[in-house]
Image (tube, grey):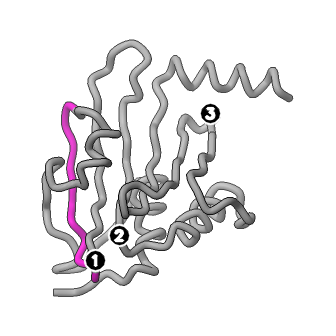
Amino acid sequence: MAEVGPDALPGIFVHACLDGRVRFGAGEVTPASFGDLPSALRNRLKAPSTGQVWRLNTAGRSYLYMLNYDPRRGADPKICGLASDSMSLDAAGDAVEARIAGVAFSRPDSEIQWLRPEDGYVVTAANLAGFKVVHVNWLSEEKRKAAVAALRNVQ
């Protein structure tokens, strides 16, 4: 089995969740289920209607998840993320910032969010019960329009 190193995890998140394309070699991932995710993360993600979860072959426990939610008023339709007990949260933040802003800025060592309403998403990176989690919430059209309007008011 090929092992995915912890340094590759932030790039996997960016490619899978922000770019919508990632390739894995033989043995780098195995299918998993929503129930395999850490319980604190499952509680935060609530109950998706459908989705896919993969366990990455890493030294620790790492999961890539793509979840879909019922389209009800105000609900975000999709969440994609990566949770790992071996990924560096700083490296994940750097990868997100490099992808979004073209450069990585210094930031606090706790939860951080990047709001991109014009692109329709919010990215969150946080520590959660021993896991470093980075995920993107794809906003409902209603939330996206509200965020764009709020941003215009600030400017």
Residue most extreme to the front: 129
The amino acid sitting under disc 2 is Asp
In the image, residue 43 sits, relative to residue 66, either above or below, namely: above
Q: Earlier in the sequence, mark 1 or mark 3?
A: 1
Q: Contact, CB < 8 Å: mark 2 with mark 1?
A: yes
User: Magenta region's main secondary structure?
Assistant: strand
| Residue that carries the numbered disc 2 in the rendered image | 85
> Distance of mark 2 from mark 3, alpha carbons?
29 Å
In the image, residue 148 sits, relative to residue 31, either above or below, namely: above
Percent position (x, y) of residue 99?
61, 61
**Mark 2 Cα shell of 10 Å, populated few (<14), some (14-19), many (≥20):** many
Number of callouts: 3
Describe the element under mark 3 as helix, strand or loop. loop
Describe the element under mark 2 as helix, strand or loop. loop
Q: Residue at x 41, y 67 (%)?
A: 12
The amino acid sitting under disc 3 is Pro
Between circles 2 and 3, the one closer to the viewer is 2
Q: Residue at x 65, y 65 (%)?
A: 98
Q: Earlier in the sequence, mark 2 or mark 3?
A: 2
Describe the element under mark 1 as helix, strand or loop. loop
Magenta extent: 49-59
| Residue that carries the numbered disc 3 in the rendered image | 117
Q: Is residue 56 magenta?
A: yes
Q: Is residue 90 magenta?
A: no
Percent position (x, y) of residue 101?
71, 57
In the image, residue 71 sits, relative to residue 27, either above or below, namely: above
Quarter the C terminus occupies: top right
Residue most extreme to the right: 155
**Mark 1 Cα shell of 10 Å, populated few (<14), some (14-19), many (≥20):** few
**Mark 3 Cα shell of 10 Å, populated few (<14), some (14-19), many (≥20):** many
| Residue that carries the numbered disc 1 in the rendered image | 60
> Distance of mark 2 from mark 1, alpha carbons?
6 Å
